[in-house]
């Protein structure tokens, strides 16, 4: 009995020492910084470029839906112009994360950041302080022209001095931050200087993957580090929505004749669905932003989705309750 008790005490001591060691390592890795190039992208006062940036920010890139506060959520869903002062709360496995103020305010917004700093964050996922930015803005493959357009538009947004709450990162989040969360933008990837809009599947691929981030919700992901773990565009069972306690089964968008959500649709049905807006409270789909997309852009995305390999993957009803 004494030997068993002694072994148990020794095991408990080892476990305690390991826990302390892990805690110290995690604490020491909370402020990791990373290097990334500063893109040679600059804001412009050209009205056409600013208009393109405004279309992207308020339309397919759906910056508006995330970078307004919760008090303006209803106004956003009605398609009204809302402030880009941040504050929207995302409840994630890693904690509660609040979107940033992206107005021109020099204290609480991005007014004090250079064009190159903003461009680096959007292209490589490295913040102005060198931290790895959570993978909410996967604009890593934007063309130089569209990156410049977005920054040009943001420079026209009226400064708003509203502060944003600090993120509330839990123990899981601190561990993920220490070991898993890294910049997602590949530094050795070639980006196009410009991409000319049309209705082809090729431009649809650019819109869906580099701007609208359709694959970010319609492909299952590991929420601890943002990596894709499912088949591309085959849907995601149990994705957390914006309403507490409610999850969504994002549909399979591949042209599979059995499980594809769009199997009985034509382009007119697809287009009108985007114009109709959300069906469920807390839907993660930024319908209000996507409703502003042009018919040509929707046609390009439709052509791209129809060109995907068919994947047999049943995701179930759109609305799922994650309390069950």
Image: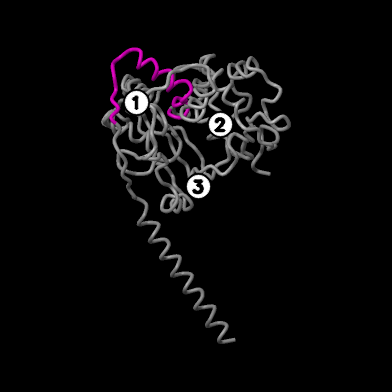
Using the image, tell me which numbered label, if any, was put on residue 103. Answer: 1
- Whether residue 45 is visible here, answered yes or no, is yes
Circle 3 Cα neighbour tier, 10 Å, few/some/many (<14 / 14–19 / ≥20): some
Magenta part of the chain:
40-67
Give the residue number, with chain letter if any, for mark 3. Answer: 224
Which quadrant of the figure has residue 69? top left
Q: Secondary structure at mark 3?
A: loop
- Pointer 3 or 2: first along the chain: 3
Residue found at x 58% / y 21% = 303
Q: CA distance from mark 3 to mark 2?
A: 18 Å
Q: Quadrant of the C terminus?
A: top right
- Pointer 1 or 3: first along the chain: 1
User: Can you say whether 284 is above or below 91 in the image?
Assistant: above
Circle 2 Cα neighbour tier, 10 Å, few/some/many (<14 / 14–19 / ≥20): some
- Whether residue 240 is visible here, answered yes or no, is no
Picture coordinates of residue 115, whole percent (x, y): 28, 29
Q: Is residue 155 left or right of residue 294?
A: left
User: Can you say whether 208 is above or below 269 in the image?
Assistant: below
Give the residue number, with chain letter if any, for mark 2. Answer: 284
Q: Quick check: is 20 in the magenta stretch?
A: no
Q: CA distance from mark 2 to mark 1?
A: 23 Å
Residue found at x 65% / y 17% = 269
Q: Secondary structure at mark 1?
A: loop
- Pointer 2 or 1: first along the chain: 1
Q: How many discs appear?
A: 3
In this rendered view, identify the residue nearer to me: 143 or 323. 143
């Amino acid at each position: 009995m004494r030997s068993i008790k002694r072994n148990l005490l020794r095991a408990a001591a080892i476990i305690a020492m390991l826990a302390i060691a892990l805690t110290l390592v995690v604490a020491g890795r909370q402020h990791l910084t990373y290097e990334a190039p500063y893109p040679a992208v600059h804001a412009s006062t050209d009205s056409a470029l600013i208009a393109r940036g405004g279309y992207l920010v308020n339309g397919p890139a759906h910056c508006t839906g995330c970078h307004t506060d919760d008090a303006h959520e209803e106004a956003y869903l009605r398609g009204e112009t809302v402030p880009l002062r941040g504050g929207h709360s995302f409840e994630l496995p890693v904690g509660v994360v609040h979107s940033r103020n992206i107005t021109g305010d020099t204290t609480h917004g991005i007014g004090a950041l250079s064009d190159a700093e903003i461009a680096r964050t959007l292209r490589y996922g490295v913040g102005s302080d060198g931290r790895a930015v959570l993978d909410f803005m996967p604009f890593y493959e934007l063309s130089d022209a569209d990156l410049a357009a977005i920054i040009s538009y943001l420079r026209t947004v009226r400064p708003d001095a509203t502060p944003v709450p600090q993120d509330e990162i839990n123990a899981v989040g601190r561990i993920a931050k220490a070991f898993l969360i890294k910049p997602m933008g590949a530094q050795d990837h070639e980006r196009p200087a410009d991409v000319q809009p049309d209705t082809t599947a090729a431009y649809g691929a650019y819109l869906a993957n580099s701007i609208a981030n359709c694959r970010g919700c319609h492909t299952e992901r590991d929420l601890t580090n943002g990596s894709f773990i499912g088949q591309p565009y085959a849907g995601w069972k149990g994705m957390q929505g914006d309403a507490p306690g409610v999850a969504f089964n994002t549909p399979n968008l591949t042209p599979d004749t059995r499980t594809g959500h769009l199997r009985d649709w034509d382009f007119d049905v697809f287009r009108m669905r985007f114009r109709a807006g959300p069906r469920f409270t807390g839907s993660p789909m930024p319908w209000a932003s996507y409703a502003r997309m042009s018919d040509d852009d929707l046609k390009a995305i439709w052509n791209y989705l129809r060109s995907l390999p068919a994947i047999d993957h049943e995701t179930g009803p759109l609305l799922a309750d994650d309390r069950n």
